[in-house]
Amino acid sequence: KSFNFFSLLYLSTIVPIFFAIVIVLVTLGRQSAIRVSRRHRFKKQAERRLANSFNAYDFVPIAEHTPQAEKKSRAITNQGFFVFLLLTFLVFPSVSTLVFKFYSCKKFRDDDHNVKVLQEDYSIDCRSRKYRRNRIFASLALAAYPIGIPLLYAVLLWRHRKEINPHVNHDHVLSKLALNDEDKNFILTADREFNFCIEILKSHSRKHDERIQHLQFLWEEFEPRCYMFSVIDCVRKLALSGILVFLYPKS
């Protein structure tokens, strides 16, 4: 066969990496274009101000790095990170399942000896030298996709856990509620309602925190206290798709 399971494995694992590199290059290119444009505009404005000044000592320098420019640069970074996370989210289930299928072999008895072939492609012998050579690549793909993507999510979310799930003081919660003293005392004793108010304030706080907007894809669908649920969702997908390859080979 000119195109077999190994070809599909290489194609499915390398193409997302290629697109990830393209995303990084495009983001860096946009950042570079903004810096060049800002530097050129800064130079033109400086020359115009200097030319209009009768005294060189009267010249007031202008800032090259303005808050607006920094905000635009941060927005480009957030967009690039969003597309990258979306790419990992889309390819994770299918590529992970394909990687697991590499390790799923089936035994047949052929005359006096046993034959062990790949469940997904009977033309591939699991005891052949070609299969053993490709095991190195499959191990790298296993580390990059089924293990690497959830680990990446976990590291990013844990690193910014204090911003995604910010601490809210009880007095601060009560100050935001237009209630009398009796109602406030009721809220304090009703844990469920009070925790609901806390989660609302936490959600409002993280929504306007510029430090974590590049990770919004991972946490925006979940309550602040469940900020690690994207990782749990990855494990769930592995259990429903990839791991079933070993439990039910024909699934």
Image (spheres, helix red, strand yellow):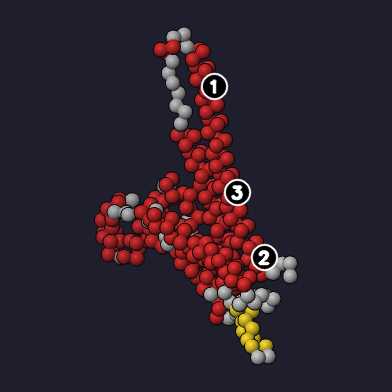
Check contact, mark 3 vs mark 1: CB within 8 A. no
Q: Is residue 249 above or below residue 24?
A: below
Relative placement, left or right, of 133 versus 71 is right
Q: Position of residue 216 (x, y in %)?
A: 48, 53
Question: What residue sits right under mark 3 in the picture?
Answer: 22
Q: Say which residue appears at 51% left-offset and 47% top-offset.
A: 78
Q: Calculate the distance from the C-alpha at mark 2 to the C-alpha at mark 3.
A: 22 Å
SS at badge 3: helix
Q: Mark 3: give few (<14), some (14-19) or many (20+) Cα within 10 Å.
A: few
User: Which marked residue is nearer to the observer: mark 2 or mark 3?
Assistant: 2
* Residue 186 image point, x, y percent: 28, 62
**In the rendered image, which quarter is residue 119 located in?**
bottom right
Q: Earlier in the sequence, mark 1 or mark 2?
A: 2
Write down the residue under mark 1: 44
Whether residue 245 sits left or right of residue 164 in the image: it is right
Quarter holding the N terminus is: bottom right
* Amino acid on which the number 3 mark rests in the picture: Val
Apparent side of residue 16 relative to residue 159 in the rendered image (left or right): right
Q: Which mark is residue 7?
A: 2
Q: Residues within 10 Å of mark 1 (few under 14, many from 20)?
A: few
